[in-house]
Image (cartoon, coloured by chain):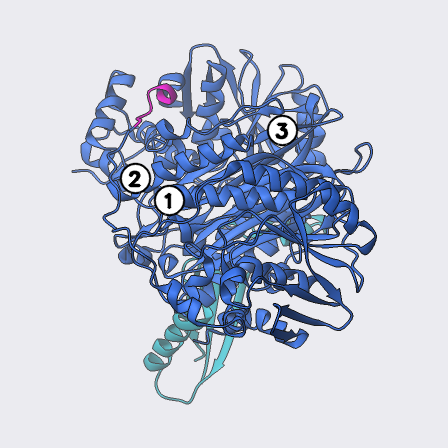
Amino acid sequence: MSRLSQLTDTDVVDIAAAEEAGLSDMEFARAQKILGRVPNKVELGCIASMWSEHCSYKSSRVHLKKLPSEGPRVVQGPGENAGIIDIGDGLGVCFKVESHNHPSFIEPFQGSATGVGGILRDVFTMGARPIALGNLLRFGAAHHEKTPRLFDGVVRGIGHYGNCFGAPTSYTDVAFANAFNGNILVNAFALGIVPLDGIFLGTASGVGNPIFYVGAKTGRDGIHGATMASDAFSDDEELERPTVQVGDPFREKLLLEACLECFATDALVGIQDMGAAGLTSSTFEMASRAGGGVHIDLDKVPTREAGMSAYEKMLSESQERMVLVAHKGKEQVVRDIFAKWELDCVEIGRVTDDGMVVLEQGGQEVARVPARPLADEAPKYDRPCHPATMSLKRDERVADMQADNVKGFITRLMPQPDVASRRFVLEQFDRHVGASTLVDGMHSPAAVHDVVDSPADKAVSLCLVARDDLCAIEPSSGALRTVQEAYLRICAVGHEPIGVSDCLNHGNPQNPEQMNAFVEVIEGLAQACGDLSVPVVSGNVSLYNETDGRSIWPTPTIAMVGLGRGAPAMTVAPGDAVVLFGAWPERLEGAFGLRLYGKLTDRTMFADWAHGEVLRTGRAMREAVAAGQVARLWPMVPGGVGRMAIELFDGIAHGLEVVVPKLAPGPLAAEDRPVGLGIAPQATVEALTRQHPDVQVVGKVLEEGRLRFVDGTDEVTFERADLARRDEAWARIVAGVR
Amino acid sequence: MRGRIIVRKKPELLDPEGDTIRAALARLGFDDVEQVRVAKVFEVDLPDGGRAVAEARLQDMAEQLLQNPVMEDATVEIDP
């Protein structure tokens, strides 16, 4: 039995050390076969990291390829640092969403901050300048003892990194549930604009070309992050206090500018961020993509501490670092640019043609591993699945809700943090730095950003959606609903949905029920994205989100990106019409509002997938907003038409009257139809209803600041002051008030 | 008696503030400074109840409030 920590770099390992590093017996045997001998400690560290769930996607690869990733606009699909979609005029939009769940649970501020840093690097290594950030967060129950500290830390960490770096954080989605008590979700999204003739990929080609290490120095922080993210938590491990990373957003800003300046020269061959598994993943991935090898002298790697071993240098996850490959003879160009931005830039090796990653330290070879076989022959598992043993039952809460009245339902709905105002969170972010933000997510279903320096008024939009509450009941239908909501949110700002990045947050894949949920989620996403023609161009999978055997809800986060001209008109005046796109929703199964009436423990069926209706309504919404016939519009979101009316009311200075078919919770809470509720200016409402027969007038904008629901005989009114309840939820959470 | 709790970032962690100060010192001519690490000092006045007791209490204060155990180390000292 040898403990890893007692071995030196070149000591040959045994099966116990391999197990400690996270390799199974079979994987260790396979590693020995690839090498033709037993690996030493450095080689084991590299192989275990590359074959960790986090880096190799070994449990998810066979299923991920079911997702549609092609389309006429797709320039770069999955497999690179981020995806790219053509938005015309020689420009592309580059984006990706990624999880930073485990680090954020251990240290919420730095964990979430470095999550933002990582996703920004993924986008700007492709050659794009980041113009927007977004995030999707899931915390434990609002009254759970850990929630206040985690919530506060995560929100401040995200704000800190984005604000200092200088990219606007314009969109957020936050929800709370018991299922996340021991395992929060922090999914960070970044979007940038790239000239299509200036895209850079992570490849190390051209024998003899120099390999540079640029950015910050390497320290002993975050060693083993990738393997840590590929393992479940237990409460004991919390006490071990693993090391975390500290981010430096100001240095990242310098790194961005230096990289973009470098891209504009003809000096670069390829570039790769040092993310999870640090120098290991960047060197192995760049070499295997190019089909060649690299030779690295680890003595040249800039370090913060003296005496770092090769093992530590290869596995450190210190932030704000990159590996880049330059053309031979252009070394000085690269050095001068990074010197100007006061960043370390050191030549650490050369590209070779022998297909091997060779590492040297102290004049001695410490590792020699073939790059391609390690990537090609990475373990791949089709793990056993079987559906959760939940019986299909009628949802008893439907009757409880139907027994309530509109006043009761809306009063319960307003202070629910999941559907409350996003003000408290978004106000902590700089949503407008960089001057690209046309509309942020405060009162809009999606954020809209101007593509500066593009012809005309080209704009892109973004939103992040997860319906974990539905995926917990019925993973496949929940996934369909997730994509539907994201799609309609983009349509509601008058844009065309053009692409998706997905972040799949799930439990332990070795648990057949969790694996089954994962597979069903992918099937749902594949069908929805296929039917709606939105390709999935980038993403990430986060498994093992469980603590002491309790798993999170399956949570596929969908980040949808749209393309259009400008943003919705937004201006509203008394007398304008309230309009409904589509027919009133009816069925309550699967409605968020039911959660206000107790807990569901069984499976229940909800809404069929009617993609024709989604496409038709989406198109009508998009055209009407783009034509200025609708000034503000909310699509179907959790909380139903009741929530949509509240969101509209919260975003304007006037009041709203909404005529409902029946003054009962049903039509306001039901979510079974892909509808939209909007405000149409008086001058255009007639043209709108003529062009779109599915649009009906269901009310008007009032002079006084009230929200009124009426049917033929009765009315229920809410005052502007009642909206304060939408903000109080946050204050209660931060204060830890139960 | 007066005690002191010193809270420092763990040595393996990046200290952006320290790095910035080191760079500023170099610009002022102190260019041989190899590293600067920033730490926080809490001076705490306690009733005289014995050195060992005071040290234990200061350590408790650090663990329960003043130190982020994931990222920081704390040391305590008592004035003679």
Q: Badge 1: how crowded within 10 Å, few (<14), some, or many (20+)?
A: many
Residue closest to the far left: A1
> Do the residues indicated by labels 3 and 1 lie within the same chain of the protein?
yes
Mark 3–mark 1 Cα distance, whole angstroms, equals: 28 Å
| Label located before the other in sequence (2 or 3) | 3
Q: Position of residue A504 (x, y in %)?
A: 43, 41
Figure quadrant of the N terminus of chain A: top left
Residue located beneath label 3 in the image: A85
- Does the CB distance between marks 1 and 2 fall below 8 Å? yes
Q: Between tags 2 and 3, which lies in front?
A: 2
Who is closer to the viewer here, A166 or A73?
A: A73
Residue located beneath label 2 in the image: A516
Residue located beneath label 1 in the image: A475
Q: Position of residue A573 (x, y in %)?
A: 80, 62
Above or below: residue A6 compared with residue A654: above
Please state which amino acid type lies under the numbered disc 3: Ile
On the image, which quarter does residue A547 sit in? Answer: bottom left
Q: Say which chain is blue.
A: A
Please state which amino acid type lies under the numbered disc 1: Pro
Dot 2 falls on a residue whose secondary structure is helix
> Do the residues indicated by labels 2 and 3 lie within the same chain of the protein?
yes
Q: State which chain disc 2 sits on.
A: A
Side (left or right) of A49 relative to A687: left
Q: Say which chain is cyan.
A: B
* Highlighted range, magenta: A374-380
Q: State which chain disc 3 sits on.
A: A
Above or below: residue A417 compared with residue A553: below
